[in-house]
Image: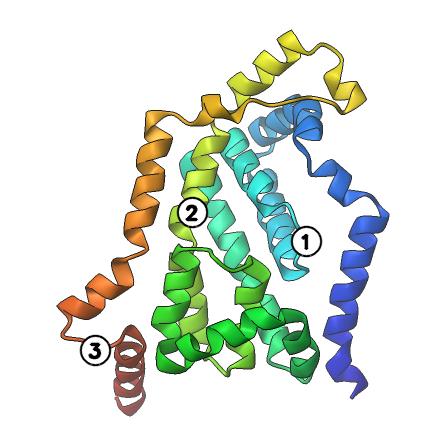
Amino acid sequence: MLKRWIPIFIIIGLLAAAYMFGLHEYISLSNLIRQREFLSNLVTENLLMAIAGYIMLYTLLVAISFPGASLITMASGLLFGTVVGGTLTVIGATLGATIIFLIARSSFGDFLQTKAGPFMNRMVEGFQKDAFQYLLTIRLTPVFPFWVVNIVPALLNMRLAPYAIATFFGIIPGTFVYASIGTGLDSIFDSVLETQAGCVEANSCEFDFKSLVTPEILYALIGLAAVSFLPFVIKKIRGGQSLAEQTNTASNTQDKS
């Protein structure tokens, strides 16, 4: 019984340590301005180490359900660019989501089910009808908190492979939108430093994010909304067979062969 509880103790311990050491204060726009030059130099001089460190950090934060993922995703666009930053974020988020999924499938299901609360009751029917398609849809249109969507499929006995695949592809559009927004932070930061001298030290910087909403970002947001209908379009084209059924059929065929 103790071995079964070890993972949850580790998660709680890491989450408590993160707050104790003030990680939530480091994940802020003011601190990103302060550390921008250092982080940029780190990426330039030690690209592989920066890539590995970013993936590990993002995986850990998702695994312990630490807030601030959107800002970190934007930071990836600032430091690595949209394509590389978005790709690294998708990898880290999928790994972190898979870790908490595996933990949720263990003996702490009742505890995590209580944590998920009313969100779980609203998602049960969708997962019972077609777990893969439903998970892909809610990943594409994140109407539920990310950590809740990480936990509920495990409590409803969804298989690991479909979960990981739906998570990986489902978070791509939104992740790249946030990463692309991050590529415009440099100009915003420069403007803030010019007009609000000393705001970084006082942690009182005010940001005008309206300037980040470029035509390209608007097109990306429209595309994100369009992608949310992709599972239904695929189901319609393929004659109504669900994505989950197709995945199971392919898996069974491979097993027989």
Residue reaching furthest to the right: 20
Marks 1 and 2, how far apart at CA: 18 Å
Which kind of residue does numbered mark 3 sit on?
Gln
Where in the figure is residue 200, as x and y percent of width and height?
74, 20
Residue at image position (54%, 77%) is 154
Quadrant of the image containing the C terminus: bottom left
Q: Residue 36 location in percent, x, y?
A: 64, 25
Upstream in the sequence, badge 2 or badge 3?
A: 2
Q: Residue placed at 71% from the left, 23% from the top?
A: 34
- How crowded pointer 3 is (Cα within 10 Å; few <14, some 14-19, many 20+) is rated as few
Count how many numbered circles sit on residues in the image: 3
- Is 79 situated above or below 222? above
Residue 66: which numbered mark, if any? 1
Mark 2 crowdedness (10 Å alpha carbons): few <14, some 14-19, many ≥20: many
Q: Which label was assigned to residue 174?
A: 2
Q: Is residue 143 above or below residue 178?
A: below
Foreground of the two, 219 or 48: 219
Give SS at disc 3. loop
Q: Is residue 93 above or below residue 107?
A: above
**Residue sitting at x 38%, y 70%:** 134
In 3D space, how far apart are the residues under numbered discs 2 and 3 (Cα atoms)?
Answer: 26 Å
Label placed on residue 241: 3
Residue 220: x percent and y percent? Answer: 34, 38
- Residue 98 at least partly seen: no
Residue 75 visible from this viewpoint: yes
